[in-house]
Structures are given as structure tokens and as C-alpha cells.
Image (tube, helix red, strand yellow):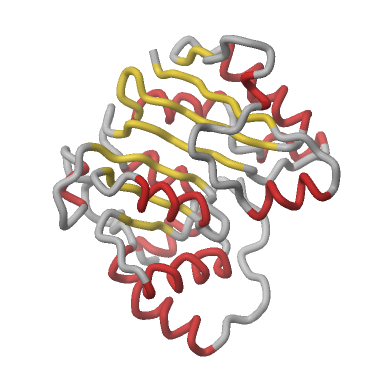
Amino acid sequence: MTDEHRRKRATEGFFGRRHGKPLRPSQRATREDLLPQLRLDLTSPAPADLRRLFDIPIEGVRLEIGFGGGEHLLYEARRFPNMGFIGVEPFVNGMAKLLAAVKLEPLSSLRVYDEDATQVLDWLPPASLGGIDLFYPDPWPKKRHWKRRFVSDKNLDRFARVLKPGGRFRFASDIESYINWTLLHCRRHEAFEWQASSPADWHTPYEGWPGTRYEAKAIREGRRAAYLTFIRL
């Protein structure tokens, strides 16, 4: 069994379907061309200094887990050209959308991964990230599926290991049960402190927030989003 097959079998199952509509020929060609160039190689040890992953000088590195179509990830990479960004998205169509945008506007500050984000978290060196973003993750609303929610004690331990002191974990969702779930798990974890100075804070979008297609859908369907920020102590 190859290392690639072992990684695929080792997934912890936090995401649902992998494929949507069949990719168009142009999308397949772009994916075949760009994904190998941008994809993290987890078969080699991670560099002690993550800035070595990028071809340009950068000041720090952030991670976005489950970037969907890449709207926020691309926005932040363009907004902060001196930062490096790692984006993880197992959904083939979402990755294809991001790569199509990168083909039109190349970004040397971007690296991606198309499997389970826990594999990246376990690969990264300690205290190597300035931030982790998890926006509109699969809520797994049925109680029997809650164990598949990405926010868990085990994954918060992973976050705590790779975040620098003062680093931020940001979580956004429109699903009330998942919002409460995340607050409960993070507030009882000794490594994280919730940043909220007023009752309105958690319903106020992040500074510079561009929105996402998932958020737009939630608003159309009458659901209110929450934006939580936790600091690594």
C-alpha cells in the first residue's frame, strides 16, 4: 500500500461527499496542471520554518480548513500579500473553483491540500501558524453524527499544538447547535479564550469579511450567522 493510500484510509471522516457535478475538460486540465504545483507534500517532513514552503518572502502562515469555493481564502491572500496561506478542501469541485481563479491570477503565497485537514495539522510543526479559520463547516446536525463535527477536543488539541501563542482560531456558522457546541468545547479547553467584548460581537462579521456563498444561502433562508474568535493562550 502506498503512502497516498494510507493517508486516504486514515481520514477521520469530518467531511461528507467528495464530488459534485463532473468537472468540465478545462477544469480537469487546470486541476491536473496546478494542483501538483500547489499541493503540500506530506510524505516529506514539514520544514521547521513554514515560510520555506513559499517562493516569496512572507511574515507568517495561516490555515483555512474547508475553504469551499475559495472566496474567503483568495480574498485574504490578496488582502495580505506578505502572509502565506494554506487551504484545505477535500471537495473536488471546490478545489477546482479555487484553482481556476489562481490560474487567472497566480498567487505565490498559497498552498493547498485536498484530503483530511487533520493530516495537515499532524504534519505541521508546533507553534507554526498565526491563525486557523473554519467557516461554515459541515454541521452534521443529527446527534448520531456529532462525533464527525470538526470541532472536537482532539482537534482543539491539534489546533493548540500548531498555533503560536496569541494565534487566532476563527469559527463561523449559521447552525445554532454547532455554534453552541463550539463555544462549549473551546471555553472548556485550557488553551483557548473566547474574544467577545459585547453581546453583539459574535453576530458582527470579521473586519474585512467578504462573505461566502454558504453565508449568502443562510441569509436567504433566514438563518443568522455567528462569528467566533478564540485566542491561543
Decide: is 15 above or below 176.
below
Residue at the image position 38 percent from the left and 46 percent from the top: 120
Q: Residue furthest front?
A: 208
- Residue 35 spot, x, y in % from top left: 37, 70
Quadrant in which the C terminus is drawn: top left
Horizontal relation, residue 116 to residue 128: left or right = right
Residue 200 placement: quadrant? top right
Q: How many marks?
A: 0
Residue at the image position 50 percent from the left and 26 percent from the top: 156
Residue 63 placement: quadrant? top left
- Residue 82 spot, x, y in % from top left: 23, 44
Of the pair 133 and 215, the residue shown nearer to us: 215
Residue 151 placement: quadrant? top right
Residue at the image position 54 percent from the left and 50 percent from the top: 66
Quadrant in which the N terminus is drawn: bottom left
- Residue 122 spot, x, y in % from top left: 37, 39
Residue at the image position 68 percent from the left and 26 percent from the top: 203
Decide: is 22 above or below 172.
below
- Residue 98 spot, x, y in % from top left: 47, 65
Of the pair 208 and 137, the residue shown nearer to us: 208
Horizontal relation, residue 219 to residue 172: left or right = right
Of the pair 170 and 208, the residue shown nearer to us: 208
Decide: is 193 above or below 222.
above
